[in-house]
């Protein structure tokens, strides 16, 4: 860790610089993705279209600007995903001064693992959960009501779950970070597993629609990933004690 604490103003200036770089990377990637927004949109919402019956019914646009703004949000989402390595790099670079030198060297594994976990979570949701969820909601059609989903509502729901699964799969990184920084040691995290399981199912209920399929399919991987993070924390030595005094120098 650094021998001297930086003033608050310098921390805020550093944070502003990191946020500007993140926003610039996001905007550039979103601008690139805009050229492929229709293709990305069709791929992202394929599970919903399939649930409606491919070729039988299509998504509806009920406002003049709906298609344009939905494609714009689609480009923003794709740009965010493309910019994730830069985003994770900037996050680690911001917190690195408060870590030990050996911990700072983990920036490349951190960026790589975080990006892969997000992509894995989003892919898991897209390939397994989305088809089951949309099939579940399409079953309520009857002689009096027929589903006519709008592209905006379906895209918003898909985006919400896409991000939820991607962020949820970052749990091992969060658990490992809490351990190596000494905020919570690995044994305490293991003892707190029952509370973590409860918190995971509450979070899954909040993040997902009111159907038990998507809730369970989000909660179960999160519990497994929490335990994975605790295991990794144990393997790599668990928590290291933080210096109580700012004047102490790290070894």
Image (tube, helix red, strand yellow):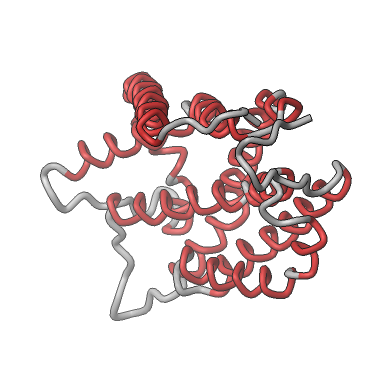
Residue 125 image position (x, y, % from top left): 58, 52
Viewer-closest of 117 and 190: 190
Q: Quadrant of the C terminus?
A: top right
Residue 196 image position (x, y, % from top left): 67, 68
Viewer-closest of 234 and 143: 234
Question: Residue 53 lies in what quarter of the image?
Answer: bottom left
Q: How many dots with numbers?
A: 0
**Relative height, residue 221 to residue 124 (above, below):** below
- In the image, taking residue 139 as reference, residue 168 lies left or right, namely right
Q: Residue at x 86, y 44 (%)?
A: 237
Q: Is residue 35 visible?
A: no
Q: Residue at x 61, y 28 (%)?
A: 2
Q: Residue at x 53, y 67 (%)?
A: 203
Question: Residue 148 lies in what quarter of the image?
Answer: bottom left
- In the image, taking residue 64 as reference, residue 55 lies left or right, namely right
Viewer-closest of 202 and 52: 202
Q: Quadrant of the N terminus?
A: top right
**Relative height, residue 202 to residue 181 (above, below):** below
**Relative height, residue 158 to residue 139 (above, below):** above
**Relative height, residue 32 to residue 141 (above, below):** above
Q: Residue at x 78, y 54 (%)?
A: 230
Q: Is residue 208 visible?
A: yes
- In the image, taking residue 159 as reference, residue 232 lies left or right, namely right
Residue 89 image position (x, y, % from top left): 55, 26
Residue 20 image position (x, y, % from top left): 34, 25
């Amino acid at each position: 860790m650094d021998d001297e604490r930086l003033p608050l103003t310098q921390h805020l200036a550093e944070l502003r610089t990191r946020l500007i770089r993140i926003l610039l990377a996001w905007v550039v990637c979103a601008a690139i993705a805009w050229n492929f927004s229709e293709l990305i949109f069709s791929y992202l919402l394929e599970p919903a279209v399939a649930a409606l019956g491919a070729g039988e019914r299509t998504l509806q646009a009920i406002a003049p600007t709906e298609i344009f703004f939905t494609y714009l949000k689609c480009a923003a989402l794709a740009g965010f995903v493309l910019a994730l390595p830069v985003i994770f790099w900037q996050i680690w670079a911001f917190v690195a001064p408060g870590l030990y030198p050996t911990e700072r060297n983990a920036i490349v594994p951190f960026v790589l693992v975080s990006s892969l976990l997000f992509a894995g979570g989003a892919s898991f949701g897209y390939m397994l959960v989305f088809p089951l969820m949309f099939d579940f909601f399409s079953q309520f059609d009857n002689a009096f009501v027929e589903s006519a989903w709008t592209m905006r509502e379906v895209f918003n729901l898909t985006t919400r779950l896409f991000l939820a699964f991607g962020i949820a799969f970052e749990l091992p990184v969060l658990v490992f970070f809490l351990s190596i920084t000494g905020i919570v040691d690995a044994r305490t995290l293991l003892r707190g597993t029952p509370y973590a399981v409860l918190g995971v199912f509450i979070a899954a209920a909040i993040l997902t629609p009111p159907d038990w399929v998507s809730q369970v399919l989000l909660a179960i991987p999160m519990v497994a990933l929490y335990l994975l993070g605790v295991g990794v924390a144990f393997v790599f030595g668990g928590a290291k004690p933080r210096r109580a005094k700012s004047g102490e120098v790290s070894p």
